[in-house]
Image (cartoon, rainbow, N blue to C red):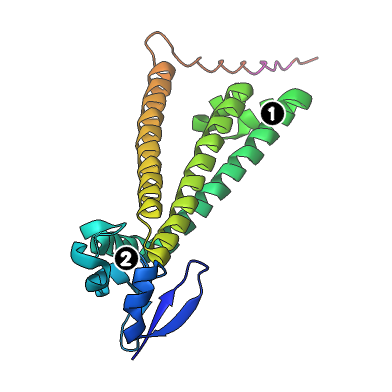
Amino acid sequence: MLWYYVSDRQERLAVPEDQLSALADSGVLRPTTLLWRRGQEAWVSAGELKPELFGAGGGAGELGESGGLVMELARTLRSYAGWVEFSGWLHGVTAVGCVATGTAVGYFAWRRPERLEEWARRVPEVLRPLLEVPWATVGGLAVVALVMFFMAGQLIGGAGRARRAEAQGSREDLCVALRSMGSFFRCTVVSLLLGVLLLAGAVLYHYRPGVRAAAPAAPMPAPVKERVTI
C-alpha cells in the first residue's frame, strides 16, 4: 500500500507503508507531516494516523496529544477562509472609498469652498454638518480609513494563515490566524461603541436646549394698487 506525504518543500511524495517507520526514525516524517492514501477524504497528520511511528509518546512530538485538535480546528477555520477573505477585501474597498471621499472634500474645502456651501444647501439636513465643517469630516474619514485598512489586513492575513495551518498542520499558523480573527472582532466592537457614542453626542449637541431653528422671515406685503380717476 502506498502512502503520500507532504515534504518540507510542499512536495507530495509516495512511500510504501513498510518504509514509514524508517522515515519517522530519520526525522523526515514528523507528527505534523500530512499523510494520505487512497480512500481518505482529506490529508491527516501522521501523529493522528500513525501514532505508533513516534514511540511511546503516541505521536506527542511537536503537537503532542492536541495534534488532532489542531488539525480539526485548522480544517474548521479553513472552511470559512473564503468568506473571511472576501470580507477583508470589502473592508479594503470601503477604506479606499473613505480616502477618495475625504480627498474630494478636502480639495473643495481648500480650492472651491463656495461649491461646498452650495452643496450644503442641497443635501439632506442630516448630512449638512459634514459639509459645513469639511476639515473635521476629512479627519474623521481618515480615521475610518485607517481602521478599515487594519481590519482588512487582519482578515486577509488570518485567512491565509488558516489555509497554511491546514496544509502544514502548524500550531503556530493556527494561533496567528485565531489572533487575527480576535483582533478583527475586538476592533469591530470598539469601533461600533465609539460610533454610537459619537452619534449620540452629535444628536444631543444638535438638539441641545436653547437652540431653536430661526423662524422664516414673513413675506413682504404686496403693494396696494390705487386707482386714480382723472
Q: Is residue 58 visible?
A: no
Helix, strand, or loop for circle 2?
loop
Circle 1 residue: 106
Residue 226 lies in the magenta-colored region:
yes
Residue at the outermost right position: 230
Query: In the rendering, at what x and y percent does residue 39 appear?
Result: 31, 88
SS category of the residue bearing label 1? helix
The amino acid type found where label 1 is placed reads Gly
Q: Nearer the viewer, residue 205 or 151?
A: 151
Q: Is residue 49 visible?
A: yes
Camera-side residue: 185 or 55? Answer: 55
Residue 184's place in the image compared with 55, above or below, is above
What residue is shown at x 36% (from left), y 82% (from top)? 19
- What segment carries the magenta color? 222-227
Look at 37% across and 35% down and name the residue there.
192
**Residue 136, quarter of the rendered image:** top right
